[in-house]
Amino acid sequence: MTDFFTRSSRGALLAVLTSVTVLATACTAGPAPGPKVVHGDGGDAAAEADANRLPTLSAPERDLNYSDCGSKLADKYDVDAPDTVQLDCAAFQVPVNPDDPDSAPLLITVVRGKLAETPADAAPLVLTTGTDLPSSRLAMNFGSSTLAPLLAKHPIVAIDRRGVGQSAPVDCLTSEQRSTIINDGASGSRDVEARTTALAKAAREGADICNDTLEPDQLKYATVDAAADIEQLRARWQVDRIGIVGVGQGSSVALAYQARHPGNVGRLILDSPIGLNTQAAPAAAATAAGVQNSLSTFARRCTDVGCSLGSDGRSMLNRLIAAGASGALPGLSDTSILTAITTALAVGPTDPDGLKKLADAISAADRGNADALKDLAAASRSLRDTDGQLLSRCNDMLGRPGLADIPKLARTWGADAPMTANSAALSLARCDGWGNAGAAPAPSSFPIPPLVLLGLNDPINGLKSAEALTPLLVTTGAEPVSVSWDGLGYSVLTRSECAAQLVVDYLGDERLTGPAERACPA
């Protein structure tokens, strides 16, 4: 079976992103330019230089009160603290209702990563992963040599989205409701209709409890509220403009910030982005297809390095996921298996040794010993399936289909994405009974050309999710520079030294020169 998202369609996505500039130019209305006038004083050259100049980014006038937290985060996330990068944590308060400064306060936390040689007066880059996983967990990957060119010049400040990670985490579900929801109603049956019913029941009961717990602020965990928290950070720093990198779902937070505060955006990096305000079913379909492709890439590359999946790793993955759906692996569902594997690929090592270690956990589970895979599943739950993440995702979910449609969607998507279709379709029932905050604001223009980093093998959202971003870039006349990366993992910036160096150039005082479409090696 061929991959759902083929190389030709990847190229088409890059071509569309690249053609945005051409379309914007061709469609711009206005008077025809007169004959070019040559000025002896070099006025044209000066005007061109001004057009290429970007706003200067500056260091905070009043910074937060940071303290060393590398060891604390290492214990929290059960990973090694980076050796070469200093990780410091800080917190600041925001009103839970951004429109009411007197509303109850929430504590928002950030993690700053920098090197010993990072200039004290360097402008920071704000990073958000949105609801994908805590930004503070991605900060634990700052120690790779990949980011050294960037961190040597600019600190990165990772902000946990409200309700996620260390930022005012939400705890409102019962353990039984939480288990049913994160396993998508799995109870030893592969029948999607029965699982939809069980999942929706737990979701509605959980929504009742969480609404009572959070009233009247249960709809204040949406993308637009996360963007408001970034504005609070900028205001505390007392700087005019900030540079933002939105990773995965964090790209929607960055775009919402651009929409609400266009004059405060100095640089905009969309790393492994998804579409803004995409309807629920198309978004889930894109995720199913993209993650299926990433798993297929993992299986192929695993074969290349001689891992224990063997020559047909896809068959083993299919078999293991089916076993989880049927209840043949006590303590693991198909959804928890997928989440465990994709999370390991997202933030874990994907060098040959890392792939072999993950493959050993998978092949052992296929033989009946699922202990290592259960450990991965437990770690992934705390990163991707917390109550706050569910709340925020439901706040943002648009156009959720009816429960009767979910089995049909699973069958349709399953033709091309057999490993991921059921879980993607069932996830649409997780928000049954939960409130929706409406669409996030969309930018009307991009005065600062965005830098778009496309991970061809993103195991959390998949590359296909980025296709939904194209109409926004076209209609606003954006002039993006797009960079594709064929590696395996989440966040191109933290995985590709080539991309990190390009970001260093992008953070300079002038627009990037050179081709609008680029590629970085895996």
Image: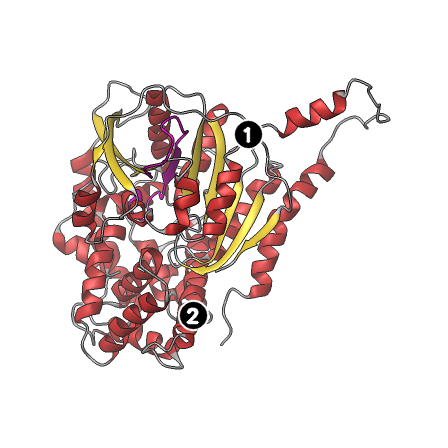
Q: Which residue is mark 1?
A: 509
- The quadrant holding residue 397 is top left
For image coordinates 28% across by 19% down, the residue present is 101
Q: Which of marks 1 and 2 precedes in the sequence?
A: 2
Residue extent of the magenta highlight: 115-135
Q: Which residue is mark 2?
A: 296
Q: Which label was assigned to residue 486?
A: none
| Nearest to viewer (mark 2 / mark 1) | 1
Q: Is residue 127 magenta?
A: yes
What is the basis of the colouring in this image? secondary structure
Q: Is residue 439 visible?
A: no
- The quadrant holding residue 116 is top left
For image coordinates 21% across by 52% down, the residue present is 382
Considering only vertical position in the picture, is 135 above or below 429?
A: above
Q: CA distance from mark 2 to mark 1?
A: 41 Å
Q: Are marks 2 and 1 in contact (CB under 8 Å)?
A: no
Q: Amino acid at mark 2?
A: Ser
For image coordinates 41% across by 56% down, the residue present is 284
Residue 46 position in % (x across, y down): 70, 22
Residue 489 position in % (x across, y down): 39, 58
Q: Residue furthest front?
A: 117
Q: Secondary structure at mark 2?
A: helix
Residue 167 position in % (x across, y down): 24, 36
Q: Secondary structure at mark 1?
A: loop
Q: Amino acid at mark 1?
A: Asp
Q: Is residue 267 left or right of residue 338?
A: right
- Badge 1 density bin: few <14, some 14–19, many ≥20, Cα 10 Å: few
Q: Nearer the viewer, residue 81 or 118?
A: 118
- Badge 2 density bin: few <14, some 14–19, many ≥20, Cα 10 Å: many
Q: Nearer the viewer, residue 228 or 51?
A: 51
Q: Nearer the viewer, residue 83 or 474?
A: 83
